[in-house]
Image: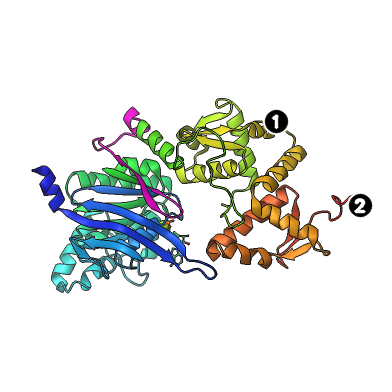
């Protein structure tokens, strides 16, 4: 009986949805691949994934802002073309109109619906009251704190009484305490049945946030994005972060997010072979050496539980995963069962002096990061021992968006400098050999 009811109340149905974006050069960028997802009335669903995994793209497809390249996205059985009725969105940044008051900003959501002025006012005031902005009706956005502005964003979405509220990392621009207050307020309102909405789809890269708020968490994998796993959260509200069941779920999610498609023994065999065209996250070599040191020292002695390590270093899941991935790429550490484990090389690195560290880092860069080898080769071969960044940027853009090519170049420059593999001049955007000829036996 309950099952039939639930089936009847399917709000959003995403079947085999893929999305590609054209790239300046070369083939298309496949951002979403064959995504299936159902959202029913009465649930808060979390979409948890790394930056760049396509979460916002999926949300924009559901919001009717962009179309899938293939597959079908429907809302209450109707294929989505343009913004569906009853779906509202809260963005990461506040997106308020600076020249309108709080009240006017909130009312705006209703104008498009053709609701008369008196009713608009009434509903806007109710939403403002509900979300804790009572008394700020005539304030302008610039007079409000970030947290208050985001409350206006929520009020503006709630005022239309949507069946589905889409939230794209709605707390990520707020400071920690403000974010926590707002999360708690929302969960309270939701569990008391006071929110004029039927369901929520929330995008986040914060594991604890997902466990705190959601009934169901979909883990999104990257490159291209697809739903890799689903976790049910059966804990009653209000949830306690220290509850062992809460911690266990956080742990499981970390393990799932660092798991590769096949569960491998801890070797490098199963890590996708790096190519010249791989995106390199910008992580400074200082941060990497700091992390290696922390991992090598007590209480970890070479192996750390990711949530524990993230907690100690005050990093979010997404950040610790980025750092861990860089270490993994460089073969200084490995993910295994939700832990980050130093390799022999990582342990060695931890015990070396600065100069020896640089040398080891350089060896690993050349051995495991193909683009570093490419740049070194080009510089070695050219009589001038210099090359413009554009030479490599073009090559990178065959594989990735401009934005990612920028990020990757930044990483190349900072790692290459630290390892003293090459120098880079910001003015002329030129790479050059640190000390040309030194490895050619004096020339
Ligand atoms: P997330 O929200 O998970 O961080 P996004 O959905 O914003 O990820 O982006 C996923 C990928 O799609 C990124 O590589 C991004 O550069 C690319 N992308 C998103 N929108 C566009 C677009 N309009 N044109 C080209 N590439 C895009
Ligand atoms: Mg996003």
Looking at the picture, how far across and down is residue 117, in whole percent? Answer: 16, 73
What is the secondary structure assignment of the residue under circle 2? Answer: loop
* Image location of residue 193, percent across then percent down: 16, 47
Q: CB atoms at circles 2 and 1 under 8 Å apart? A: no
Q: What residue sits 31% from the left and 68% below the top?
A: 101
State the residue at coordinates (62%, 56%).
Answer: 276
Q: Residue at x 60, y 53 (%)?
A: 275
Left or right placement of residue 272 versus residue 192 in this view: right
From the viewer's perspective, is residue 369 above or below residue 98?
above
- Magenta extent: 219-247
Q: Nearer the viewer, residue 88 or 174?
A: 88
Residue identified by numbered label 1: 351
Quadrant where the C terminus is found in the figure: bottom right
Is 438 displayed left or right of 390 in the figure?
Answer: right
Q: Whole-percent x and y of residue 209?
A: 36, 44
**Residue count near mark 2 (Cα–Cα under 10 Å), binned few <14, some 14–19, many ≥20:** few
Residue 113, compared with residue 308, is above or below; it is: below
3 over 12 or under it: above or below: above
Element type at mark 1: loop
State the scheme by which the image is colored. rainbow
Task: Give the number of the disc on residue 409.
Answer: none
Q: Is residue 148 visible?
A: no
309 to 102, vertically: above or below: above
Q: Quadrant of residue 367?
A: top right
Disc number for residue 442: 2
Q: Residue furthest left?
A: 1
Asked if the stretch drawn in magenta spans residue 243, the answer is yes
Query: Residue at point 38% right, 63% down?
Result: 19
Q: Indicate if the residue with disc 1 has its beta carbon within 8 Å of ligand 1.
A: no
């Amino acid at each position: 009986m309950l099952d039939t009811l639930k089936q009847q109340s399917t709000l959003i149905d995403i079947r085999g949805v893929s999305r590609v974006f054209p790239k300046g050069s070369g083939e298309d960028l496949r951002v979403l691949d064959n995504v299936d997802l159902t959202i029913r009335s009465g649930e808060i669903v979390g979409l948890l994934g790394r930056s760049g995994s396509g979460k916002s793209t999926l949300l924009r497809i559901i919001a009717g802002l962009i179309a899938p390249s293939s597959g079908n996205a429907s809302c209450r059985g109707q294929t989505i073309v343009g913004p569906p009725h009853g779906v509202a969105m809260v963005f990461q940044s506040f997106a308020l109109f600076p020249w309108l008051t709080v009240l006017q900003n909130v009312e705006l959501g209703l104008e498009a619906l053709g609701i008369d002025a008196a009713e608009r006012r009434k509903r806007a005031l109710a939403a403002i009251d509900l979300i804790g902005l009572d008394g700020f009706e005539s304030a302008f956005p610039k007079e409000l704190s970030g947290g208050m502005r985001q409350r206006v964003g929520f009020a503006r979405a709630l005022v239309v009484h949507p069946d589905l509220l889409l939230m794209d990392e709605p707390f990520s621009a707020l400071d920690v305490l403000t974010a926590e207050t707002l999360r708690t307020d929302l969960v309270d309102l939701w569990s008391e049945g006071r929110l004029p909405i039927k369901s929520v789809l929330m995008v986040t890269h914060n594991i604890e946030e997902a466990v705190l708020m959601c009934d169901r968490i979909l883990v999104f994998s990257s490159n291209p994005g697809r739903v890799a796993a689903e976790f049910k959260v059966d804990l009653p509200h209000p949830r306690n972060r220290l509850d062992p069941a809460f911690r266990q779920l956080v742990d499981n999610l970390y393990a799932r997010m660092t798991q590769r498609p096949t569960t491998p023994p801890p070797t490098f065999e199963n890590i996708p072979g790096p190519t010249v065209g791989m995106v390199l996250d910008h992580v400074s070599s200082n941060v990497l050496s700091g992390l290696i040191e922390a991992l090598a020292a007590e209480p970890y002695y070479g192996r750390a539980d990711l949530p524990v390590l993230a907690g100690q270093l005050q990093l979010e899941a997404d950040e610790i995963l980025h750092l861990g991935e860089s270490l993994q790429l460089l073969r200084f550490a490995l993910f295994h069962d939700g832990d980050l484990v130093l390799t022999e090389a990582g342990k060695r690195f931890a015990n070396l002096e600065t100069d020896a560290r640089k040398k080891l880092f350089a060896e690993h860069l050349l051995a495991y990061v193909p683009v570093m080898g490419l740049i070194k080769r080009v510089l070695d071969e050219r009589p001038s021992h210099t090359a413009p960044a554009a030479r490599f940027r073009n090559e990178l853009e065959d594989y990735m968006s401009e934005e990612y090519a920028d990020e990757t170049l930044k990483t190349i420059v900072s790692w290459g400098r630290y390892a003293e593999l090459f120098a880079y001049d910001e003015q002329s955007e030129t790479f050059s050999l640190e000390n040309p000829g030194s490895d050619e036996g004096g020339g």
